Amino acid sequence: MKNITVHLDFISPYAYLAFEQLPEVLMGFSYAVSYKPVLLGALLRHHGQLGPAEIPAKRDWTYRHVQWLGHQHQIELAMPAVHPFNPLPLLRLSIACARGGDPNRYVCETVFRHVWRGGADAVDPARLQLLREQLAPELEPDSDKVKARLRQNTDEAIALGVFGVPAFSVDDKLFWGFDALPMLRNYLRGDPWFEGPAWQAVSQMPAGMTRKT
């Protein structure tokens, strides 16, 4: 049985699409999945990157692209009223639902669909309150324990080499992005390509130039 860790942030439409598609990708395999909320902004800062929504032309394309992907794969998706937004309340709530551990699929699905279905403001206070009452009315999403777990998840993801979401770690392999799902499935099928030279050789390739920022 394979143990798969899904690193996600609810702010990412690609993470939402991958989350919805994942059961189909994993069909026929024996596996266990852990869902690890991480703060995408912290990953980007660590690696010196801007998010897609921070680059105006890329922002427009990204929003068109994810809506096309939803249409193509028959996954319901509507852009939230405001994007990007601060995902911390949603990330912390998901961890609080697991009492400081890893949220289950139901919790992640509920939060993702809160954001990516209906086109409403994902962090509107009234909607957040309703979501909290649905998932964890008796818990404290802003507790030190919850905050520490989110930092831990993010730090562990960085240590694994995660630079964006969604990311899937299994064995010693890391797969990034919605479009890597077919690659993940082939790995789980035992495709010998993943044990060949192509996987490791890229990390030994010298860089011909670097760009100063």
Image (cartoon, helix red, strand yellow):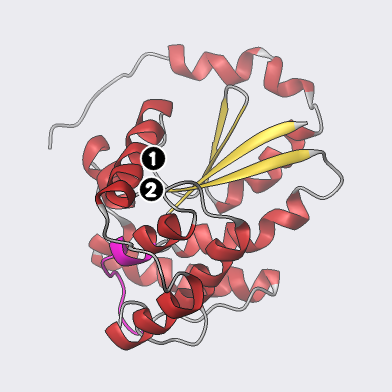
Residue under label 1, please give it. Answer: 153
Q: Residue at x 63, y 37 (%)?
A: 4
Residue 67: x percent and y percent?
53, 75
Magenta: main secondary structure: loop
Residue at the far left: name it.
213
Asked whether residue 43 is drawn in magenta, I would say no
173 or 49: nearer the viewer: 173
Q: Quadrant of residue 51?
A: bottom left
Q: Amino acid at mark 1?
A: Asn
Q: Residue at x 74, y 51 (%)?
A: 25
**In terms of sequence position, does the residue under pointer 1 or pointer 2 come before the other?**
2
Which corner quadrant holds the C terminus? top left
Which stretch did the figure color magenta? 81-90
Q: In the rendered view, would you say 36 is above or below 90? A: above
61 or 179: nearer the viewer: 179
Q: Amino acid at mark 2?
A: Val
Residue under label 2, please give it. Answer: 38
Residue 24: x percent and y percent?
77, 56
